[in-house]
Amino acid sequence: MAVATLLFLSLTMQASAEAPSHAPGEHSPYAGRQRQELGALTDAQLDDLRVGRGMSFALPAELNGYPGPSHVLELAEGLELTPAQRRRTEALFAEMQAEAVRLGERLIDSERALEALFADGRAEPQSVMRATTEAARLRGELRATHLTYHLEMKQVLTAAQVARYSHLRGYGRDHDSRSGFTK
């Protein structure tokens, strides 16, 4: 009797753990994603990767006093960039974007390869590990690219321009002791 009770409880707990997180009759939050180009990336993410947008990859830099080239160009007038600063910022932005587009395409290809393992029924632990590791490596490289250009951009600006950038971006005026500038 005790064994039967334990078996029943075990099966009940397993069934509830495997139950969908949505109510019966409701669609999964992933419904429709199978019609996207890639299930793991939204159409907006694909567009961002293809044109080299930052996708919030550089937030640790952005929020801690390391301006990004694209936003510096947007705020060029308010930052009172010198002609030399503008040229350097434009060059940094063009380099960053070219590198980000190249890496973004490679990341898309790696996600496509991962998805193909499952779509073709070839997924095995080793192949999945290789494919996910490659996708993660490329995502990390892309993020490092964006962060590195924020580092370079800060070297182009004066301390006053960095502080003005932070103000113009709406980050406030509190002093951030980690980066040594006034937000």
Image (spheres, rainbow, N blue to C red):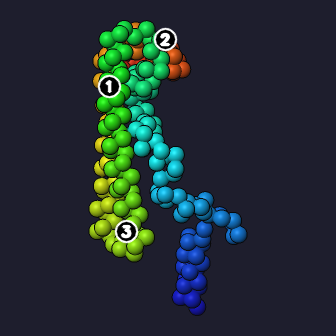
Q: Nearer the viewer, residue 39 or 27?
A: 39
List x then y, in percent, for residue 131: 32, 61
Residue plotted at (42% across, 39% down) = 51
Give the structural element (helix, strand or loop) at label 3: helix
Give the structural element (helix, strand or loop) at label 1: helix
**Which numbered circle lies on residue 78?**
2
List x then y, in percent, for residue 21: 61, 64
* Badge 1 density bin: few <14, some 14–19, many ≥20, Cα 10 Å: many
> Looking at the picture, does residue 147 appear above or below residue 124?
above
Task: Mark 1 or mark 2: name the one nearer the start of the chain.
Answer: 2
Mark 2 is on which residue type? Gly
The CA span between labels 1 and 2 is: 19 Å
Counting labels gives 3
The CA span between labels 1 and 3 is: 37 Å
Mark 1 or mark 3, whichever is nearer to me = 1
Mark 1 is on which residue type? Leu
Residue at which label 1 appears: 92
Q: Is residue 154 visible?
A: no
Mark 3 is on which residue type? Leu
Left or right, 70 with reference to 172 = left
**Which numbered circle lies on residue 129?**
none
> Looking at the picture, does residue 98 appear above or below residue 3?
above
Task: Mark 1 or mark 3: name the one nearer the start of the chain.
Answer: 1
Give the structural element (helix, strand or loop) at label 2: helix
Residue at which label 3 appears: 117
Report if the CB atoms under discs 2 and 3 are less than 8 Å apart: no
